[in-house]
Image (tube, rainbow, N blue to C red):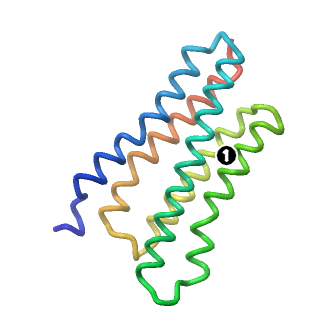
Amino acid sequence: MYKLKTPQAPLALTTTSIIPFVASAGAMYVWRGDTALQQTAGLWLIVYGAVVMSFLGGVRWGAEMTRRDKPRFGELLSSIFGVLIGWTLVIAYFQWRPDKILFLAMAAALVLHYVLDVMSGEMPIWYRRLRVWPTLGAVLSLAVAYWLFGRA
């Protein structure tokens, strides 16, 4: 039963992890008439997405490290792609000027991370199921940000 049913602590914490995504997109809506404030909220969203991508990579890294005496290079490599993508998107937000395409890139990266986790037969079933709603919440928030960005 434990392998199928999500433990309460991960369920509660994962559910609350959606709040910063929704709050940042909400702030972009509230501040849609003020470009500077809207860009600030957009930065919050991109940075939080990068933090989540780093966390998810840490989950994959930790799972691989605890399963094997000799962790597989490919699994460890796939665990760091989120860190690198998140870091790149944060830099891009500053370097290129804030651009709405960055929200879609973050959404795509989160979906890719989700697909990798679901395809991994070694992640617990409850974890793979748990990831559905937070990923959808994050992607929808990023899609709203894409739609709102630059609208006055």
Indicate the amino acid at tag 1.
Ala
- Report the residue at 73% width, 50% height from top: 88
Q: Which residue is mark 1?
A: 105
Residue 48 percent across, percent down from the top left? 56, 41
Is the C terminus in the top left, top right, bottom left or bottom right quadrant?
top right
Q: Is 124 left or right of 24, judged from the image as shown? A: left
- Report the residue at 63% width, 73% height from top: 77
Q: Is 58 left or right of 85, judged from the image as shown? A: left
- Report the residue at 61% width, 58% height from top: 82
Q: Is 90 left or right of 21, judged from the image as shown? A: right
Q: Is 36 left or right of 74, judged from the image as shown? A: right
Residue 108 percent across, percent down from the top left? 61, 50
Residue 34 percent across, percent down from the top left? 67, 12
Residue farthest right in this picture: 96
Residue farthest left in this picture: 1
Viewer-closest of 119 and 33? 33
In this rendering, is residue 16 above or below 61? Answer: above
Residue 149 percent across, percent down from the top left? 67, 24
* Crowd tier of the residue under label 1, counting other residues whose Cα lies within 10 Å: few below 14, some 14–19, many 20 or above: some
In this rendering, is residue 64 above or below 52? Answer: below
Please give the count of numbered marks on the rendered protein.
1
